[in-house]
Amino acid sequence: MTIKQLFPILFLVFGFSAIQAQKVGHLNSQTLLAEMPEVKEAESNLKAFQTQLEKKGQQMVETLQKSYQEVSRKEQQGEISPKQLEEEGKKLKAEEEKIQAYEADMQAQMVTKREELLQPILDRVNTAIADICSVKGYQYIIDLSSGVLLFASEEHDITAEVKTKLGL
């Protein structure tokens, strides 16, 4: 056998032994996060924040509707000139644009608030996972909830250990 023919065989033998030496664990982050009181509190705070933003948006829409109805009433009763109608139409259009801008801003505020509330919790979970990996010698932890998993042995599921570490 030549070196070129022997190389693939050596690669397979040494490659498999390197793979066998790696310790892989898994957990289900969705289940884990669903059981954390901090996540429930953050979601509750986020919902309250969303309600507050939506209330302001609804008030803006109601004000616009009233303004539109008033202009429409004046037009029907002949209390407004065509020039004034045009000016009022421009004002209404500007208000519509403000509402659209507010809706976009509201979405951005929700994303920012979600990150602000959840990031400390995710940092805590990641620290717990890193601590367990260090102690147990895991090279990889796979999140079952992400769907990126080909095989998982129950003996390597560290969800219960992470829960214990987090006091759940």
Image (spheres, grey):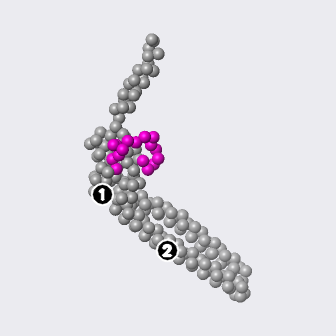
Numbered tag placed on residue 90 in the rendering? none
Numbered tag placed on residue 55 in the rendering? 2
Quick check: 160 above or below 69? above
Numbered tag placed on residue 168 in the rendering? 1
Q: How many marks?
A: 2
Provide the residue span drawn in magenta.
144-159
**How far is the residue under mark 1 from the one under mark 2?**
35 Å
Task: Give x and y (percent) for residue 41.
Answer: 37, 65
Task: Give x and y (percent) for residue 38.
Answer: 34, 61
Crowding at dot 2, Cα within 10 Å, few <14 / some 14-19 / many 20+, comes out as few
Q: Amino acid at mark 2?
A: Lys
Question: From where the camera sits, is residue 128 visible?
Answer: no
Secondary structure, mark 2, is helix
Q: Residue at x 39, y 23 (%)?
A: 13
Describe residue 40's horizontal placement relative to residue 76 as left or right: left
Q: Residue at x 32, y 51 (%)?
A: 160
